[in-house]
């Protein structure tokens, strides 16, 4: 009985949240402060109810989390009920009431706790550290010190302005991201997700190492919508990882392929796992401009992974899956392909300048209509409600985290620590751009540990991007640098959330899987530097010929790097050959026509030497 009551309550609130977001993000205007407060309210209430439903259902557990859900509802309802007074008072002159301070403190504590329940403690610890720095940093010596910030004024920033809890991250999730989560929910219910996986398997399964290539293709398609590397692993990996293992791939390699492919899905336009929306808000650059800039880097990422998978199949002597075990391309297109036309609708609307929210809305309508073409995908009333509820379940894992990140952004804004850090790092590196980039890469990697990608990107962007812009980098290059390195911790030890999730499905060692994923995803370490030294890849003020040359050179460099790391081309290589390919790759990628030409010459010579015995064997035959 208790389980049924909880399930009904969660479903009603989740569906209600999705309907609310659809109505107020499409054609009905609602004040941003009100929209964001209701948005956070739904998220916190559902987080506590979902937590009550997990694990052992004891009366004590249900009571505690149900009470916290009620407190969340009342605390967030306080803002709409007092909106006129809160927004019309003069900040800093009209002091908060005692009740304002109590409610604000409760909201911050609720955000911290729900974030802990959602993704664990790393982000919460970081947020608490920023809060303590804001309140007590004026006692610190040197550049770390800042002006006194009182508890009441900081709470004012956090809760009663559009800077803290209800700042930009929540603004993006409430205005754009949620509608795309609804769109993703409809894709799941109409089996479009199955289409991506089945189509990828049908397309590549008959080639050498095909199942691993299918994982690469499927995860790139699914990942752009889900916005979560771990969710992508769980969605596509349950199909692709067992298939890779049956083909002959080692479990740790199968898990690594899925982890790298799933992580890269967030680099793929048009959605990029919500990063494109956040970047558009942070930079003021048009959304579609960011989407276009992301195309070539994402191709480089998946090209390198595809090459690595193919060379591993050659190195281990793997073949293809027999045809009778695989779906046909035409069969998959006939059965489920029509629902994917909704993505075409979405992209066309975005390209024509419609807002992301309105594009997503009409994408949802188009998907619902297209689902009726075939019985297997038909969306009934129950399916419609299920899609809305699925979106709410996904949003619960995002919204508390973004509210928590908003607290960090407020702390950075109030204390000015971002600019101070920029000045300190500039002095430390003596203005050397490469040294500065390496330090910022390490900083981004550490800050991204254990965090969802969007949250990691926002924090890194707040701390890192101003410094890169001060060094003369184009704004979009600086933000893409921060975004790519915010992803790095998903596949690299010691955290490697995506790799660990894939390892649990593959039945392999987590650390072995993570190190293999690092090798396969090494291009994630290289491409961000190209944003700085070859900005043509982002289509930043470059002529078409410059873009083509930069992209061709980058492709060759990524290919050579994959060859060096796999140690195989037509046959296995010795250590000297691998070092030669590695040197050639580095020289090709390094800026400057002299180094690029030298690298190309080295790679051409190594390729001839490697392939020459094969040519001789052919001539003798």
Image (tube, rainbow, N blue to C red):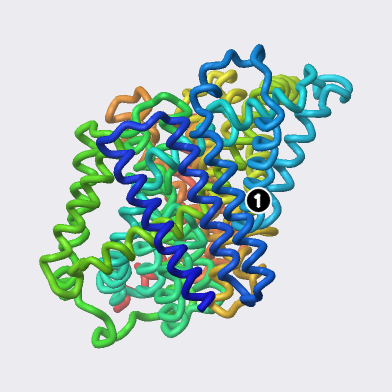
Residue appearing at x 28%, y 35% in the figure: 28
Q: Is residue 103 left or right of residue 233?
A: right
Q: In this view, does 526 lie above or below 260?
A: above
Residue at 69% x, 35% y: name it.
439
Instruction: Give residue 317's position: percent from left, percent from top.
Output: 44, 80
Residue 110: x and y, percent?
Answer: 65, 47
Res. 594 visible in picture: no
Residue labelled with disc 1: 449
Q: Quadrant of residue 385?
A: bottom left
Image quadrant in which you'd find residue 91: top right
Residue 331 occupies quadrant: bottom left
Asked if residue 515 shows in the view, the reply is: yes
Viewer-closest of 202 and 46: 46
For the residue pair 14 and 565, the one nearer the viewer reads as: 14
Question: What residue is at 65 percent from the left and 35 percent from the top?
Answer: 104
How many dots with numbers? 1
Residue 370 percent coordinates (x, y): 15, 60
Is residue 378 found left or right of 205 in the rendered image?
Answer: left
Please give the name of the residue rendered at 60% of the width and 32% of the height, measured from the top-left corner. Answer: 159
Q: Is mark 1 on a helix, strand or loop?
A: loop
**Quadrant occupied by the C terminus:** bottom left
Residue 47 lies, in percent from the top left, at: 55, 57
Give left or right: position of 370 versus 589: left
Left or right: residue 85 compared with residue 428: left
Question: Which one is in front, 365 or 576?
Answer: 365
Look at the picture and state if 258 lies above or below 456.
Answer: below
């Amino acid at each position: 009985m208790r389980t049924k009551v909880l399930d009904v309550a969660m479903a009603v609130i989740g569906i209600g949240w999705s309907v609310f977001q659809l109505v107020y993000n499409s054609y009905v205007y609602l004040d941003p402060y009100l929209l964001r407060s209701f948005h956070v309210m739904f998220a916190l209430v559902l987080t506590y109810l979902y937590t009550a439903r997990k694990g052992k259902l004891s009366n004590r557990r249900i009571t505690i989390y149900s009470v916290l859900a009620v407190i969340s509802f009342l605390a967030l309802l306080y803002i709409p009920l007092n909106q006129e007074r809160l927004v019309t008072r003069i900040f800093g002159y009209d002091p908060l009431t005692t009740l304002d301070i109590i409610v604000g403190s409760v909201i911050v504590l609720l955000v911290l706790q729900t974030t802990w329940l959602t993704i664990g403690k790393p982000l919460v610890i970081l947020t608490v550290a920023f809060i303590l720095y804001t309140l007590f940093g004026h006692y610190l010596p040197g550049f770390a010190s800042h002006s006194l910030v009182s508890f009441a004024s900081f709470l004012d920033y956090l809760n009663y302005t559009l800077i803290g809890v209800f700042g930009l991250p929540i603004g993006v999730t409430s205005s754009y991201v949620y509608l795309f989560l609804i769109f993703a929910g409809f894709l799941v219910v109409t089996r479009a997700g199955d289409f991506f996986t089945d189509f990828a398997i049908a397309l590549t399964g008959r080639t050498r190492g095909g199942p691993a290539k299918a994982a690469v293709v499927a995860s790139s398609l699914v990942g752009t919508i889900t916005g979560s590397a771990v969710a992508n692993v769980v969605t596509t990996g349950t199909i692709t990882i067992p298939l890779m293992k049956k083909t002959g791939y080692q479990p740790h390699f199968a898990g690594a392929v899925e982890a790298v492919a799933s992580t890269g899905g967030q680099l793929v336009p048009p959605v990029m796992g919500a990063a494109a929306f956040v970047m558009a808000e942070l930079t003021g650059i048009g959304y579609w401009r960011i989407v276009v800039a992301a195309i070539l880097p994402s191709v480089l990422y998946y090209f390198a992974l595809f090459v690595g998978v193919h060379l591993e199949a050659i190195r281990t002597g793997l073949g293809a899956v027999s045809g009778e075990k695989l779906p046909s391309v035409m069969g998959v297109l006939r059965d489920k392909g029509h629902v994917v036309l909704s993505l075409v609708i979405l992209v066309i609307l975005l390209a024509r300048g419609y807002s992301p929210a309105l594009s997503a809305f009409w994408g949802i309508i188009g998907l619902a209509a297209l689902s009726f073409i075939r019985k297997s995908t038909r969306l009934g009333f129950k399916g419609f409600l299920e899609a809305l509820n699925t979106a709410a379940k996904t949003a619960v894992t995002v919204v508390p985290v973004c509210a928590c990140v908003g607290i960090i952004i407020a702390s950075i804004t109030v204390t000015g620590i971002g600019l101070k850090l920029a000045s300190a790092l500039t002095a430390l590196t003596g203005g050397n751009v490469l040294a500065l980039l390496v330090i910022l890469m390490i900083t981004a990697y550490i800050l991204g540990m254990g965090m969802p990608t969007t949250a990691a990107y926002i924090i890194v962007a707040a701390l890192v991007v101003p410094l890169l812009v001060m060094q003369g980098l184009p704004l979009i290059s600086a933000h893409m640098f921060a975004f790519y390195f915010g992803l790095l911790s998903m596949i690299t030890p010691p955290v490697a959330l995506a790799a660990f999730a894939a390892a649990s499905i593959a039945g392999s060692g987590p650390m072995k899987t993570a190190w293999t994923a690092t090798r396969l995803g090494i291009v994630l370490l290289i491409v961000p530097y190209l944003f700085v030294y070859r900005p043509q890849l982002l289509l930043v003020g470059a002529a078409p010929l410059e873009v083509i040359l930069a992209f061709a050179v980058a492709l060759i460099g990524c290919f050579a790097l994959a060859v060096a790391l796999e140690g195989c081309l037509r046959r296995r290589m010795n250590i000297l050959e691998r070092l030669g390919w590695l040197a050639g790759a580095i020289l090709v990628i390094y800026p400057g026509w002299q180094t690029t030409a030298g690298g190309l010459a080295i790679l051409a010579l190594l390729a001839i030497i490697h392939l020459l015995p094969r040519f001789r064997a052919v001539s003798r035959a």
